[in-house]
Image (cartoon, rainbow, N blue to C red):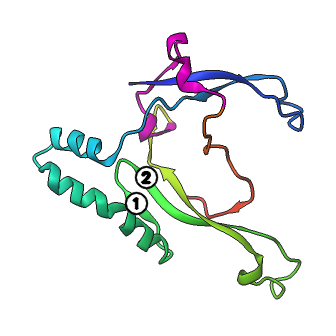
Amino acid sequence: MTVFVKKYQNTNEKMTKMYRKWYGKAVIVDKVEIDQLANEIQDNCTVKRSDILAVLSELGPAIKKELQRSMKVYIPYLGSFKMVVHSTGTDTSEDYDVNTNIVSIRPRFIPETKLDNKHRVAELVKGVRISELPKNMSYLAEDGEENNDTPSGGAVEEQP
């Protein structure tokens, strides 16, 4: 399988070391929904599509429930989900109050990794090929595309 990449130039003047340099960005070519996943899973096992749909439909709510109970949710071959908080700091422990110093809380996904030639490799990218987006597919990489994969600083979390 191939992940397509498009070239882009950083035009943010505030990022002085990266300003005007060229980078690559993964392109999303389409979206796969629950029905398509159920069909693919059915093709690879003996469970019927209807049973798979029932399980997949309950996966999100089940993960949400466990995260909201302060649990880490591990799914083999995929990874773990956990909650992280962004918090403002105080000078003393007594000054810190979770009701006023917590700025946000978010779920975080940590992909499962395995050792491969003494390097940690995420299972989800193991064996992936990368290719520049062909010119005839450039309509898939319009400038206005949504980009939710930029890191947000300041998250407070334990390391997995």
- Answer whether residue 53 is magenta in the image: no
Against 49, residue 32 (above or below) is: above
Residue appearing at x 62%, y 40% in the figure: 147
Residue of label 1:
74
Image quadrant where one finds the N terminus: top left
Badge number at residue 79: 2
Where is residue 65? Give x, y as percent.
Answer: 42, 73
Against 90, residue 26 (above or below) is: above
Give whichever of discs 1 and 2 has the lower sequence position: 1
Badge number at residue 155: none
Residue type, label 2: Gly
Rendered image quadrant of residue 87: bottom right
In-image side of 70 versus 42 (left or right): right
Residue appearing at x 47%, y 78% in the figure: 69
Residue appearing at x 79%, y 82% in the figure: 96
In-image side of 82 versus 86 (left or right): left
Dot 1 lies on which element? strand
Residue appearing at x 71%, y 81% in the figure: 98
56 or 121: nearer the viewer: 56
In-image side of 118 versus 147 (left or right): left
Q: What stretch is highlighted in magenta?
A: 119-143
The residue at the far top in this view is: 135
Where is residue 158? Give x, y as percent.
Answer: 61, 64
Where is residue 145? Give x, y as percent.
Answer: 61, 35
Image quadrant where one finds the C terminus: bottom right
Within 10 Å of the Cα at label 1, are there few (<14), some (14-19), or many (20+) other Cα atoms? some
150 or 73: nearer the viewer: 150
Dot 2 lies on which element? strand
Q: Do the residues labelled 1 and 2 touch (CB within 8 Å)?
A: yes
Against 41, residue 58 (above or below) is: below
Within 10 Å of the Cα at label 2, are there few (<14), some (14-19), or many (20+) other Cα atoms? some
